[in-house]
Amino acid sequence: MEPSAAPPFADQLRALREGAGALWLDDRAVITVRGDDRLTWLNGVVTADLRPIALGHGAYTAIVAVKGKMLADAFVHRTDDALLVVVPAEQRDALLAHFERFIVMEDVLLDATPERVLTVQGPKAVALTEGWPGRSIADRLGLGGVDVLVGEGHEAPSYGAVTPVSREAFDAESVAQSRPRWGVDFGIDNYVQEAAITPRAVSFQKGCYLGQEVVCRLQMRGHVQKQLVALTQAGKTPAAGAEVIAEGKVVGKVTSVTAGIEGEPAKLLAMVKYSTLEKRPALEIDGAPADWAQ
């Protein structure tokens, strides 16, 4: 059963950082993949290696077009008889159409299914959700976590010691942990490397997959033209869209920001030119100094 209200904002952030915080991901939808060939087929249309996934575990991945631009990011969860692909809700129909194009003779069935996704994130999330139906390991903030996939007509388990958090708090902690968000920090106009998710989302050892040639070429070249980076700014909280200035020139834009708490500086994600990232010059945003995050 879901609690009626979230605690104060600072307590929500503390739960995500030190305990476990839960949020319904109503901006995510599920594509279910069934059939005898589901694992080998899906492994050929996403960037991560899905083969090592154990039951009750998920893998973060990107889904890219033939020419390498991103179509979505996703978590793929493995159950006894299916793979559940949690994707941005606004992209689900386009992804279903995309996937259907690449089923030839494989025994694969795709379906848009009605599960809701309750994510529980934080260092105590795994321990506090032990035994919850539909639970699958999914670390969304880099602090440990799970997704709980709740079928239609089913209730989520009682939260117990898990703290309900708001979308605002969850997004703020995403920025604080340098975890970029689909549709905010990156999207369909970006390559995987521009989104700075390559270490988490891409396997360069698994073999062929759709869009691999472009992804590998960009990696071998060593860089893309622009890339998301983490910045900080003390004493000021700029708005998303603010220009990043270096050596008197505009070198990027802020994509998301969270105000610092308890004396911390504001934390930002910004898309900047790679040449600037290489040099790491002094930065300015809204007329005030900004720093490269460590």
Image (tube, helix red, strand yellow):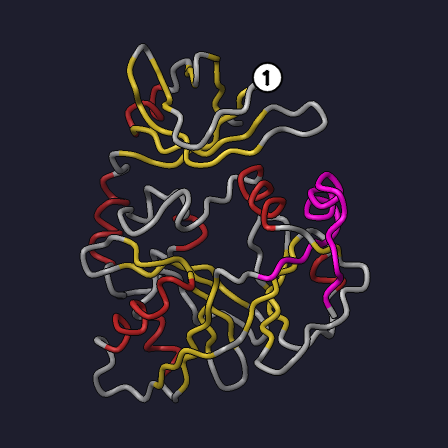
State the image coordinates of residue 208 (x, y, percent, origin top left).
Answer: 26, 66
Helix, strand or loop for disc 1: loop
Disc 1: which residue = 235
Left or right, 289 with respect to 57, comes to left
Residue drawn at x 65%, y 81% as measured from the top left: 154
State the residue in front, 56 or 150.
Answer: 150
Residue 128 among those drawn in magenta: no
Residue with the most extreme front position = 4
With respect to residue 205, does 286 lie above or below? above
State the image coordinates of residue 25 (x, y, percent, origin top left).
Answer: 55, 61
State the residue in front, 4 or 204.
Answer: 4
The range drawn in magenta is: 2-24
Residue with the most extreme right position = 161
Quarter of the view holding residue 2: bottom right
Residue drawn at x 81%, y 59% as measured from the top left: 161
State the image coordinates of residue 241 (x, y, percent, origin top left).
Answer: 39, 31
